[in-house]
Amino acid sequence: MLWFALVLLLLLVGIVGWVVAGYNRLVRSRVRIDEAWAQIDTQLQRRHDLIPNLVNTVKGYAAHERETFEEVTAARAKAISVQGPADLAEAENGLTQALGKLLAITENYPELKADQNFRQLQEELAHTENMVAGARGHYNASVRDYDTARKVFPTSVIAGMFNFEDREYFEVETVEVRQAPNVSFE
């Protein structure tokens, strides 16, 4: 009888240890996602802070492009105000398109492209875009790891018991790759 009680106690301790370890693994994964999201948020804030300076610099050279400036400003305001990965991704896609239009009009102003301040802002924006992409990759990898831990047995049992919910991926539209022109000297 004592032997049976000892085995039962060890089995109970093992089950409790397994539940605690699984729970802690899921919590650590969730914390990594929150940390990765904070990195995205920081980089997007940096991007949002650069945009007014870029717009004002371009305005000095191309004041008649008012519609484009308003579109960039509206897209920036929307991107700042939304919450959640899916809504933010949609808003950031709109902002990226508006910025593309803004940068496209600069092609018509060689003196703007030569402006040191504009070039520096353009370089900072490109660097920030790379940082956002890196942070997005880290976030999505963290979500993938969390989802995997949540869905595989036996951790799925613990995830169900403690209501560990899905997390959204942060997906942005990829820019369509343009085919290189065919050049012929015939």
Image (cartoon, helix red, strand yellow):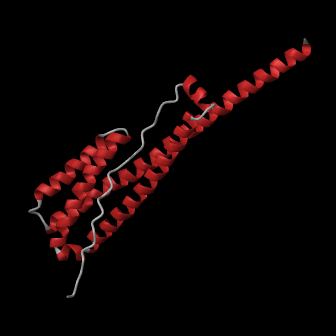
Residue at 25% over, 62% down: 54
Q: Quadrant of the N terminus?
A: top right
Q: Is residue 181 left or right of residue 124?
A: left
Q: Position of residue 93 (x, y in %)?
A: 28, 50
Q: Residue furthest right?
A: 2
- Residue nearer the viewer, 45 or 21: 21
Q: Is residue 49 left or right of residue 104?
A: right
Residue at 25% over, 50% down: 94
Q: Residue 78 is drawn in which quadrant?
A: top left
Q: Is residue 13 left or right of residue 108?
A: right
Q: Is residue 10 above or below residue 28?
A: above
Q: Residue furthest top?
A: 1
Q: Position of residue 67 (x, y in %)?
A: 11, 55
- Residue nearer the viewer, 182 or 39: 182
Residue at 58% over, 37% down: 149
Q: Is residue 120 above or below residue 31?
A: below
Q: Residue 112 is drawn in which quadrant?
A: bottom left
Q: Residue furthest bottom?
A: 186
Residue at 78% over, 23% down: 11
Q: Position of residue 52 (x, y in %)?
A: 25, 56
Q: Quadrant of the C terminus?
A: bottom left
